[in-house]
Image: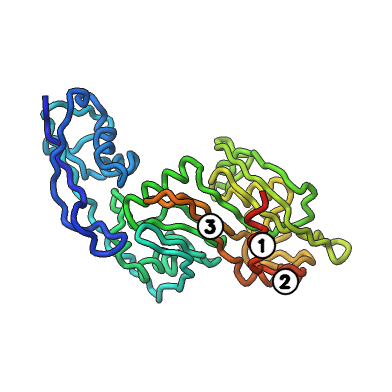
């Protein structure tokens, strides 16, 4: 028996790159005999792909945007022949009212599908308790106002955010401009096909030139705002560490420092900082994982950092629309450059190329 699935989706012309708030209208879909009994979320996601993933569809259903025969439905409900299914577009949330001017951002690349930014240290990615203003989202909306239409299916405004960097981690971050790009990039992060490289300046002389840290990470058993390799409910986490330079202590009693490159296979919260601290070499300036000796900046004889010395150096992705391999490199910020220059290392193109190309 045939039935019609009525759903709303953007099929009109875009008003600007990344915008999908164009005309909404219903589309009839023919359903073959195999469809009755299929889960509702599976059935809908198959028809909204690739713009929307199954998890996004599940949030649509949870938010009450999906009705079956005029009534709210559950994701696990089975579709039946003759059902009339409709999906309402998510309401565009009220724009976040920042109390100050949007911060400037360093855009490394932008096209119709994505934006790549070199995020400054001290900038939170999106508004959160204690950090309501001067976020990356504020900066993006000021420069690319059409991103305001990129509301999540549950109505939350996280315009195109597919991954995050800690507030005090600087470096490269990619933002999706369209639902298609958001789903495609999210899939790449989930399937771990994204190539990520970080620079860290750590306390002490790291002995091994190369090492792999494979230690599961989860919430600290006591301090719930911290992550730990001693968690009761950890998830797998792997980081590959390569020493780029060692800075011997200038005086007795000092610990020296090391410049390392880290390639994380997984993307756990605070993963690199936790892993480096777990081998006795926390990031300089890390007030959370660096131990009592470094509250408020670390003085080691090697130098001082007002924030944890971690920088997202490079990001490699497949273009969501064309599949072309892309790599973006974010030059280290002033605090990194000053520290390294003080130890005879320049952050020029030659070193950036060497640091990203080392196998």
Left-right relation of 4 to 145: left
Image location of residue 161, percent across then percent down: 41, 55
Relative depth, front residue between 183 and 293: 183
> Residue at the right extreme?
252
Residue 60, image quadrant: top left
Kind of element beneath mark 3:
loop
Image location of residue 240, percent across then percent down: 65, 45
Give the colour scheme shown: rainbow
* Upstream in sequence: badge 2 or badge 3: 3
Cα–Cα gap, marks 1 and 2: 18 Å
Q: Which mark is residue 341?
A: 2
Q: Which mark is residue 166?
A: 3
Cα–Cα gap, marks 1 and 3: 14 Å
Residue at position x 13%, y 39% in the image = 28
Residue at position x 42%, y 61% in the image = 115
Instruction: Name the residue that disc number 1 marks.
Output: 285
């Amino acid at each position: 028996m045939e039935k019609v699935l009525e759903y709303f989706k953007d099929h009109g012309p875009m008003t600007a790159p990344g915008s999908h708030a164009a005309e909404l209208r219903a589309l009839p879909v023919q359903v073959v005999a195999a469809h009755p009994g299929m889960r509702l979320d599976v059935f809908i996601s198959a028809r909204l792909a690739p713009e929307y993933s199954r998890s996004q569809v599940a949030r649509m259903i949870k938010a009450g945007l999906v009705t079956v025969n005029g009534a709210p439905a559950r994701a696990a409900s089975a579709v039946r022949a003759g059902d009339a299914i409709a999906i309402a577009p998510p309401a565009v949330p009220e724009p976040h009212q920042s109390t100050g001017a949007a911060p400037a951002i360093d855009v490394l690349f932008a096209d119709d599908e994505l934006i790549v930014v070199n995020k400054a240290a001290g900038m939170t990615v999106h508004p959160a308790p204690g950090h309501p203003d001067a976020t990356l989202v504020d900066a993006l909306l000021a420069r690319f106002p059409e991103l305001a239409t990129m509301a999540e299916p549950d109505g939350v405004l996280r315009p195109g955010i597919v991954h995050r960097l800690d507030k005090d981690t600087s470096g490269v971050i990619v933002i999706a401009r369209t639902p298609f790009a958001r789903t495609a990039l999210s899939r790449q992060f989930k399937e771990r096909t994204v190539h990520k490289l970080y620079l860290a300046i750590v306390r002490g002389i790291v002995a091994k030139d190369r090492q792999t840290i494979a230690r599961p990470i989860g919430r600290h058993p006591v301090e719930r705002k911290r992550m730990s390799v001693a968690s009761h409910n950890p998830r797998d986490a792997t980081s590959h560490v390569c020493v780029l330079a060692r800075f011997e202590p200038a005086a007795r009693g000092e610990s020296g420092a090391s410049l390392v490159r880290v390639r994380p296979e997984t993307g756990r919260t605070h993963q690199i900082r936790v892993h480096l601290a777990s081998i006795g070499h926390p990031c300089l300036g890390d007030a959370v994982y660096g131990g009592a000796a470094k509250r408020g900046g670390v003085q080691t004889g090697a130098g001082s950092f007002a924030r944890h010395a971690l920088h997202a150096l490079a990001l490699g992705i497949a273009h969501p629309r064309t599949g072309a391999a892309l790599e973006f490199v974010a030059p280290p910020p002033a605090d990194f450059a000053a520290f390294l220059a003080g130890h005879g290392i320049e952050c020029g193109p030659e070193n950036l190329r060497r640091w990203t190309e080392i196998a």
